[in-house]
Every structure is written in structure tokens, then in C-alpha cells.
Amino acid sequence: MREPRWLSPAEQRAWRTHLAVHKLLMHRLDRELHAHSLSLNDYEILVNLSESPGRRMRMSELADVTIQSRSRLSHQISRMEAKGLVTREDCRDDRRGTYAVLTDEGWETIQRVAPYHVGGVREHFVDRLTDDQLEAIEAAYAPIVEHLKKLR
Amino acid sequence: MREPRWLSPAEQRAWRTHLAVHKLLMHRLDRELHAHSLSLNDYEILVNLSESPGRRMRMSELADVTIQSRSRLSHQISRMEAKGLVTREDCRDDRRGTYAVLTDEGWETIQRVAPYHVGGVREHFVDRLTDDQLEAIEAAYAPIVEHLKKLR
């Protein structure tokens, strides 16, 4: 390997600040969701299913959009099934496929909890940034998202 | 609860882009570390210990800086002990305390792997941002880090 190009102090500060804000924010939002008997992982699944036609997604697609392995997602869905939030259903047109389907209770849960979660996202993130800063974050990160998606 | 203040389209784009870049980036860097038989969690522990006096930290402090529960950290350290990267030592001056200590093998591992990891951080993040963008990210996120630290 060639001589490593270590990060400059300014690069290091930006990188570490990005890591810190994300970790602290996820920790905080997760904790706030616990008051509603949900984890941040539960919430992410509920949001994705609630926004999908028929309130259902193939497990493979759900693993893909939530960027986790099939086996990790499968454990997650089992825990949510035990809580009555989702069920599994076989795909009619694909014998190998399984859907994760939002239950009525799952739907009511996301409707009830979403306002609190959005309140937390505002209080701890969005409302602490100006419109220019929000725009700068999107402009800086969107091309990186595209780059990383191509590598998957 | 008052009427929820849902995110505007611009706010939602910034928030979702932040979430997406982080998740994809962590997934990618974790995968690149696997080529060196490490996870991103292992790497974070190794970095923290390697930068500490005596290459050691109290478990409670290490849990604090890596923002995870004592029990989760304890499992993590056990896995790293099995790989020969760290050991546990009782604190001499505090009968309740335990240190996590970097082994020679852990030290050699971080020295060997760090250049590759920094290369990945550059390739997938830092080198895709201008100096102004790096500065804007730090300026936007540093006050949020301070806010969230106070809540812990």
C-alpha cells in the first residue's frame, strides 16, 4: 500500500462530528421510542410497510431498503410478530418469496407514534439547522448516497 | 399532543439523505474491514484504546465514548478477547472497575489496518466533499452534538 493519506485536522473534525451526531441522535431517538414500546429498528420497518401498497413488502426488498442482511431482518420481524405489529405471508405468485405485512395494530401504532417521533427529529435535528444548512447537507450527501448505492 | 408539525419536503429530503448516507457508509466501511477480519465495532474499540494512555480504558468510560450499554460492550470485548485483540484487567485502585487493554496483537492490527480504513473514509466520504462542505457539516452538526451530549 502507498503511503497513507491521513486526514487533516479539518477533515478529521468533520468526519468525527458526523459520526458523533449520528450516534447520539440514533441513541436519543431510540430511547424516546422506548416510551412507546418501540425501537428505532421497529419504527423503520413500520414506516416502510405503512408507505407501501397493501402495507406489505417482500422480505428481500425490505432487507434491501433497510440495508441489513436477510437473517438479521428475519429476527427483527419475528420480534415484531410477537408484539402483534406485523405478520408474514407467502407470496401467491412466487413460491420462494415471503411478504412482511403490517397488521391493523401495526398501522395504529405507527399512526399514534409518528407525531412523537417527528417531534424528536425536529427537536434534536431539523429545527437546529437553518434552511441553508439543510440544503447544504442534502447537496453534500446525495451524491455520496448515489456512489454508495452503486457499490452494493 | 398538539397538531404534529410534519417535515416539509426539503426537511424530509435532508433528513432522509443524512440517514441514507450514514447507513450505506457504515455498511461499506464494515464490509471493507471484514477483509481484515475486523468489524466496524472492533475498529472503533481499537482506535479508542490505541489513543488512550497505557492503551487501556475503563469499561465504563469505553461504553460511554462509544455510546453503547455496558452489557453490549461486554459482549463486544469478549469477542475481541477471543480474537486476541484485547484483554480485561482489574483496576488496582477501584475494586469495582475493569479495564479493557489493547494487546500487542491489537496494537499491530490497528497499525496495519488503519491506512486501509482511512483510505475507505477518503474514497467514500471525505474526498467527495469540498473543504467548504466539510466545514459546513462540522458547523451544522457540532452544536447538535453538544445539545445531545447534555441530554445523556
Image (cartoon, coloured by chain):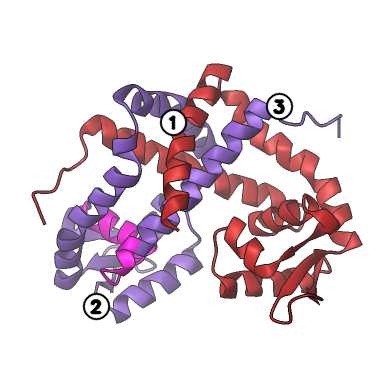
Chain colours: A purple, B red
Identify the image quadrant of residue B61: bottom right
Disc 2 crowd rating (10 Å Cα; few below 14, some 14-19, many 20+) is some
- Whole-angstrom CA distance, mark 1 to mark 2, is 40 Å
Q: Which mark is residue A84?
A: 2
x then y, percent, for residue B15: 34, 39
Q: Mark 1 and 2 residues: CB-CB less than 8 Å, in contact?
A: no
Examine the rendering and report whether any part of residue A58 can be seen: no
Furthest residue toward left: B3
x then y, percent, for residue B62: 66, 62
Furthest residue toward front: B93
Disc 3 crowd rating (10 Å Cα; few below 14, some 14-19, many 20+) is few
x then y, percent, for residue B43: 71, 54
Mark with earlier residue (3, 2): 3
Disc 3: host chain: A
User: Would residue A149 be counted in the magenta stretch?
Assistant: no
Magenta region, residue range: A32-51
Looking at numbered disc 3 in the image, what kind of residue is underneath it?
Ser
User: Would residue A40 be counted in the magenta stretch?
Assistant: yes
Disc 2: host chain: A
Q: Which mark is residue A8?
A: 3
Tell which tag, 1 or 2, sits nearer the viewer.
1
- Whole-angstrom CA distance, mark 1 to mark 3, is 19 Å
User: Is most of the magenta stretch helix, strand or loop?
Assistant: helix
Q: Which residue bears the numbered disc 1? A: B140
Looking at numbered disc 1 in the image, what kind of residue is underneath it?
Ala
